[in-house]
Image (cartoon, helix red, strand yellow):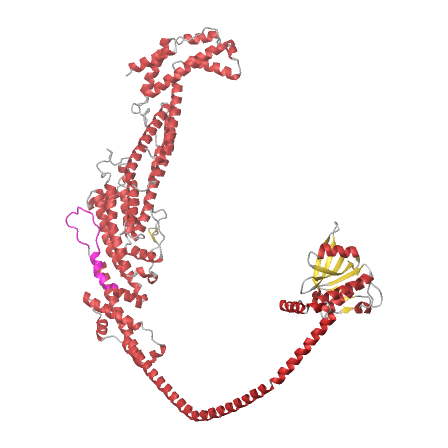
Amino acid sequence: MASLWRSLEKDVFHPQRKRLLETIRVWKTGKKKKMSILCVVVDTFRPTQPFLVKLKVDRGEQYKVACRWSLAELKLVDGKTLHQESPDFDLHLEKVYKWTASSFEEKETFLRCLWKLNHRFLASSVPFLHLPSRAAEGRERPQEEREDTVEAESQEELSAYQEMTPKEAADVLKLMEEYEPLVNNSVAFAEQLSNDLHVLDEANLRAIISSEKQVTQLMSSIDQALAEVARVEETLQVYDELLGSVKQQMDHIHQENSLLHRITSNEEKLMDELLFLTTQLSLSREHCDALSGADLSSPSRVAACTAAAEALAACMNIQIQPGYRKLQAVAEQLIMFETLKQNFENAFITHITNIFQLQGNAQLPALGQPIDKLSAPSHGLHHEELVPYIPLMAWLRNISPVLFCDLPKVYAQNLSRLYDREIKAFFEQAKTFLLGRRKGSLQESSEKPMGSRHRWSLPGSREGQEDTPGKGNVTKMLEQVLRELQPLCTAEQHFIEKFFQLSHGAADLQGLEAPATKGGETTTPPEDSPCPKPRSQLEDATTRLMSEIFSCLEAELKGFLELCSGVHPFSCLQVLVTLSDSIFEMWGSSPALPSSFLNTVLGNMLLLAKSSFNKCIGTLCREIEEAKMPSKMKGGILPSVSRFEEFVNFSEEVFRTARRRGELDKAHLRLASSVFSSINSLSSANLKMNTDMVMMENFHHVHCFLCQKKIHCLEGKKREAKQRYSEHMEKYVTKYLGQPLEKLNHFFEGVKARVAQGVKEEEVSFQLAYSKQELRKVIEKYPGKEVKRALETLYRKIHKYLSEEENLLPVVWHAMEQQLMRQYREFEELIQRCYAGSGITMDFTTEDLLSYFNSITLSNL
């Protein structure tokens, strides 16, 4: 037990600065397999606090803390040993722990320690049940327990010791130095200290007796002071009685002054309110007459009415207290203001509506002499007529929003009639300039289908040159139309935004019904417009009003674009480029509004132009793919290639200055694919033609054309055309090269086939069909003169079928020369390998072949 105590104190508690008081080995009641150790420890530093610690022993004989409780957490101790000696006991902590000690003595010692700690630190607050009296009283204890108890008591006594202060230590040292001779003799030293104490006591008594006279004098002075204080209090009481009546009089005066101040303040406030009502709610006679008369016939009178209306609005916008409205004068004044407002509102609305109607019913100037220049109408005079009424429109907008929101609709309904007539006349004039005819033949020309007049005629071509205007006519006319429309729409949009106060918000125009569609097309800007911008509620209100005013603009512009697209098959390119560049220019120019109504319309037209362009390209692709070879045509450039070339030339000229060419690049790729497909199909459709020759010539023509144009998007097609041209020229040369040496070529093809099948080269001559005799027979059929004659025949045949415009004869003839030389060398190598030592050679050499080709070339120059 002593070794366990030392081991626990050294290994477990000393590092934690704890001191071990008691230990006990326990098991859970009924489970003796797992032993634990309960320890009672206290802190070695102040304030001292006791703890219960439960330790477990691991396999390496090491102690590990399993649980730890403060002794204050202990609620009850049950010893269970009232009449019999039992090692069982219970500790009630956060739950009831039932333990069995290793022996009854250890249990009794452990509980006695808990009982003492409870008495010392917890003031006996923890109840102990079934505990033997000797354990509680501590009468009989083992020797070890007594030693521990003595040690604990000594520690407690030591804890009560207080260390001397530095001053006390210095005094003790000084005293010991003074009586140093007597320090060694303690009895003499104590007597000396006792004598000194008696001397001090005697001195103190004498000092007290000597100060008695001074104390008597002090007491008399205090009595005099008290008498003086009494006399001062009596004087103060007299003064207080005298001032009592004065205080009452002053209180009365103060009350009267406060009443006077209140009356004066009320009078001032009343005067201020009266002045406020009489000045702020007062409208001059001049303003009343101007509002009652409502004379808006001249600019000066309009200015007078404007000033009167603003003064009336100022009077009506005054914030007054609800109680004032019960005053008869105020109520009458407010009624007068309301009457003037309603009468002037009705008069102004009637007057401005009449102006709208007069402008809407205005007649167009009669067309007398022929007009040499296209021009759109101007509404500057109409706008100037309405500009003086802008302040009154702002007044009406602020004072009666409900009445104000009807005026934009009235304006749009009336002005739309005028714009309809002007825009229709403008586009009729533009169509006349475009077609170069008078009105009498305009309808006839528009009803005649353009495609039937000149299906493939382009500007500048001979076919249809009489009926087709110049190449730039469509572009110039469309640009002129857009240039004339831009200031017309922009000026109108600026005016309605200023006149109807649209810049201050579009909430007042929510009643305007926006036309959802026009001809089945929405009026929202296209997603792929050059510069799409998000539009706000203000821009939506402006666009709705502009859409109603220019209700026929989109339809007329659409009809004019269709007419432009029908001038010749590819006019849609000019329309697309002109529209796209115009939108870019309008967005970049400062006068044009970034989200103007005209931009929206042009965006819709641009979508239609793109759709028309895509349809045109689709039709052209189908016609190219479905084109048939002319019956008399035996070679040369196919019609589909010529059509592709014509389209590319025209489109590149049109898009030369265009800012965007994405649509054209897509069209070029589609057309190039269709042309390649058409070359494949047409070249193989005519059995009388050599397919490789036709494809070689046409792909060569396409490649040269694309190299000349240098179109970036067609670089891949250019490489493909070059590859196809090379492939078919090789096939063409290979096919015709077999004709001069046909039997010799067949013989050596068989030799190569036998070698490929596994026959050894030196054994080929033993084959009956490829023996040396058979080789000599074949070689004898191709003497030099016969070979030259066959080459001359081949040259004439190639010259006959190859077209002169491509000038491919020298190229093909040179390729045949190179191929024939390679073929001759191959024949010689096969003779040397398969017929070695036979001495068989051909009747002509490579020098002979070169001379044959040179003589044939020189003779045909």
Towards the viewer: 336 or 69: 69
Quarter that holds the N terminus: bottom right
Specify start and end residues of the magenta stretch as a single range. 364-390
Q: Residue furthest front?
A: 181
Towards the viewer: 221 or 235: 221
Q: Which residue lies at the image location 50% right of the left edge and 90% below the top edge?
A: 228
**Quadrant of the image occupied by residue 823:** top left
**Quadrant of the image occupied by residue 11:** bottom right
Left or right of 519 in this view: 223: right
Left or right of 182 in this view: 441: left
Q: Residue furthest left?
A: 369
Q: Give the answer, above or below, for where 613 lies relative to 342.
A: above
Towards the viewer: 22 or 700: 22
Left or right of 369 in this view: 228: right
Q: Which residue lies at the image location 31% right of the left edge and 15% below the top edge?
A: 857
Query: Does any portion of residue 461 appear in the rendered image?
Result: yes
Query: Does any portion of residue 160 appear in the rendered image?
Result: no
Quarter that holds the C terminus: top left
**What is the x, y in percent for residue 54?**
73, 58
**What is the x, y in percent for residue 84?**
85, 66
Q: Give the answer, above or below, for where 665 lies relative to 188.
A: above
**What is the x, y in percent for residue 445?**
24, 42
Residue 575 in the magenta stretch? The answer is no
**What is the x, y in percent for residue 475?**
25, 42
Residue 368 in the magenta stretch? The answer is yes
| Numbered marks: total | 0
Towards the viewer: 331 or 515: 331
Q: Which residue lies at the image location 71% right of the left edge and 69% below the top edge?
A: 182
